[in-house]
Amino acid sequence: MGFVVSKAVGPAVTRNLVKRRLRHLARARTDALPVRGMLVVRALPASADASYHDLARELDRCLAKLDAAAPRAERVR
């Protein structure tokens, strides 16, 4: 897993907060990744103002799209 949080998100304190939140959320969702899968999460500037629950909802939405696009043989359940 990797995280891209650019300076457009805000100052270092804000970027680190967003990164910590995303890291914690993603760690709890590693089972949703395909086998041998890699995940790169790019935080947009709006993530600076997003709550923890907003970030969780968006991450779940993206992982659901990933699961729907994965071939049947690679899906993890």
Image (cartoon, rainbow, N blue to C red):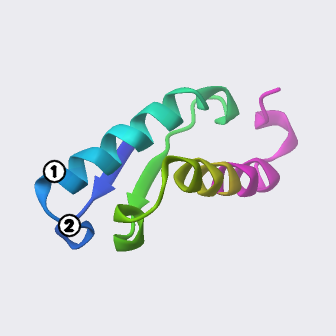
In percent of the image, x 44 and y 53: which residue is there? Answer: 41
Mark 2 secondary-structure assignment? loop
Residue type marked 1: Val
Question: What amino acid type is highlighted by mark number 2?
Answer: Gly
Residue appearing at x 77%, y 29% in the figure: 76
Q: Is 43 left, or right, of 17 in this rendering? A: right
CA distance separating discs 2 and 1: 8 Å
On residue 46, the disc is: none
Q: Residue under circle 1?
A: 13
Question: Whole-percent x and y of residue 33?
Answer: 64, 36
Left or right: where does residue 3 sit relative to residue 74?
left
On the image, the x and y values in percent for residue 16 come to 22, 46
- Answer above or below: position of 32 versus 52: above
Q: Residues within 10 Å of mark 2 (few under 14, many from 20)?
A: some
Residue at 36 percent of width and 43 percent of height: 2
The residue lying at 61 percent from left, 32 percent from top is 29
Write down the region rendered in magenta.
Answer: 62-77
Query: Residue 19 appears at what percent x and percent y?
Result: 32, 45
